Amino acid sequence: MEANRFCRPETKEKAQPWAIALVACFISGGVVSPITNYTWLFSGILGETNSTTVQTGLVGSTALSACYLASPVALLVEGVLGLHMTVILSSTLAMVSIFVSSFMTSFWGLLLTFGVAYGTMACLALHSTFCVLFRYFDRSKRSNASGFVYAGVSVSNIVLSLLYERLVGSLGWRLTLRFTALYTLVLSVPSSFLMRPRKADKVRMRHVSRQVDVNAAITIKKKDRKEEEEDVKGECSVQTVCEKVEGDNDVETRMAPYLPEDPRKKPLLRMFTSLTAWMIFFAVFLPGMAWTAYWTNIVSYFESLSLSEAAILVNVTILTGFELLGRLSLAIFIDKLPFREVNVLVIMNITFVIVTSLFALWPTEIVLLICSAFIGVGRGCAIVLPYNATAELLKGYSVDHAVTLTMLAIGAGFAVGVIPTGAVYDATDSYSLAFIINALFFLVGAMLLVLLKVLRRCRKSRRRRRLSTKSVDAAEPSANLGYDVD
C-alpha cells in the first residue's frame, strides 16, 4: 500500500491557492476595515449619542478585541456548521450588524450591535477564512499567503479611510455606517461563497489507533520503510500511523492515514492544559500589548513631544506606508529566508527592544523618522507572523487550534495593552517610561520563543534516543539466531 498517495492529495478543483488568497483579501478587507476606521466616526457618535469619551472609545475597542478574542467561539461554530458555511453566515451577519448599528441612539445599543455583534461576526469570518486559506498552502507558504491577505486589508483600510474623510463630514456617521454595510456587502459577502475548503479536506478518512505494536512494526518491508522515510524527508502534511492487519495466513503492517488538521482531533479546552500552549500565548500576548501602544497611542506620543502637525503627518504617513510594505515583503520574501517564522519573530522582538528604547529616550527628528519606518514594518508583520509560528510550535494540535490560540493572544494584547501605557502616562505625564516597559515586553516575548525552541529540540533529542533504544532492543533476539545456546 503506497503511503505517498496520502501526501498533499491531488484535487480536481480549478481554484488555485493564490486565487483563494485573493478571495480572502476581499473577505478580510470588507469585514475588518470598518473596525480600524472607527476613529473617523468617533466625534459624530460622541456628540449625537450623549455618551462619554470613554464609552465612545469602548465601542471601538470592544469591536477590535472581539475580532480576535471570540476565536474559541469561531472554532466551535466551525465544528458545527463547517468552514464554508461559517464564512458565508459570518460575513453576512457582520454586514447586517453594521447596518443595524447605524439606527442605534444610545451607547448600549452601539456597544451591543457594533462592538459585540459585529466584532464577533468579524472574528468568525476572519478565523474561518484563515482556516480555509491554510488548507491550500504548505507550511512554508502560509506566511506568504497571510502577508498577501493582510496587505489587501491594508489597501482596504486606505481606501475606506479616504472615503470616510469625505463621507463623515457631508453625510454624518449614520449614513456613513450604512454605506459601510454596503461596502461589506459588495466586497465580502459574494467572495465568501467562493471560500470553499479543498475537496480532499472534506473526505472523512478513517482513523486508527495510535498505539503501535512494536513487534508488528518490525514486519514493515524495506520498500515500505524507504517510502516512509521519503515522506518524512518531504515533510508530508498528512501523518501516518501503523495498523496491524491479520489475513488468512499472513500478518502485515500497512500505513493508514491520520489527519492532524481535523478540528475535532482534540478538545479545545485540552489545549489550555498544555504548558507549551501557555508559553506560546504569552510569547504572542506580551509583544501584542506593546504593539497596541504603537496603534492607539502613537499620535498622542507625537503630540506630547510638541511636534508640528506637518511633522506628525509625515511620521504617520511613513508608518502607514511601511506597514503595507512590510506585509507585501512577507508575501514575497518570507519563504526565501534561511530560517522559519519563529526565528524571524525572535529577531523582530529583539530589534524592537532597541527601536522602542531609542523611540522613548532619544526622540530627535531623524530618530523618529527612522523609528517610524521600523514601526510601520513591525506593525505589518506583528499580526501575520504569529500564525505560522504558533502552528510550528504547537505540536499535536491542528492548524485550526493554532489559529485560535494566535487570535486569542493577539486579542488579549489589544484588550489590555492600553491599560499599562495609559496608567503610566497618567502617573508620570510622559510616555518615556511606558515605552521602556513595552521594550521589556518585547524582550520577554523573545526569551519565551527561544525557550520554546530549546525545549522542542530537547524533546526531539529524547525521542530519538528512545527510538534508537527500542530499535536496539528489538534487534537483540535476531542477533542470537546464529549461535547455539546451551
Image (cartoon, helix red, strand yellow):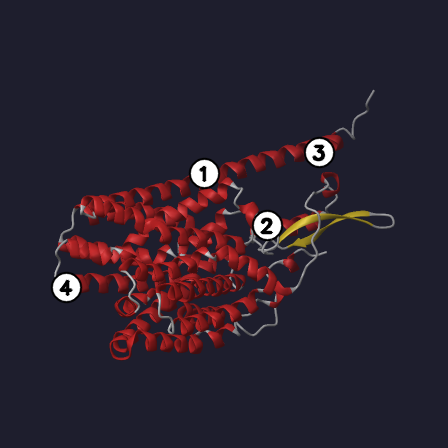
CA–CA distance between discs 4 and 2? 52 Å
Judged from the image, the secondary structure of the residue bearing numbered disc 3 is helix
Answer above or below: position of 265 versus 167: above
Label disc, if present, on residue 454 of the rendered structure: 1
Residue of label 2: 267
Judged from the image, the secondary structure of the residue bearing numbered disc 1 is helix
Q: Is residue 431 visible?
A: yes
Q: Is residue 215 left or right of residue 307?
A: right
Q: Residue at x 51, y 55 (%)?
A: 72
Q: Is residue 358 visible?
A: no
Q: Earlier in the sequence, mark 2 or mark 1?
A: 2
Residue of label 3: 475
Amino acid residing under circle 2: Pro
Amino acid residing under circle 4: Glu
CA–CA distance between discs 4 and 3? 77 Å
Q: Residue at x 28, y 77 (%)?
A: 167
**Image position, residue 181 (x, y; %):** 40, 75
CA–CA distance between discs 2 and 1? 27 Å
Q: Earlier in the sequence, mark 4 or mark 1?
A: 4
Q: Earlier in the sequence, mark 4 or mark 2?
A: 2
Between residue 144 and residue 108, name the one nearer to us: 108
Q: Quadrant of residue 309?
A: bottom left
Q: Quadrant of residue 319?
A: bottom left
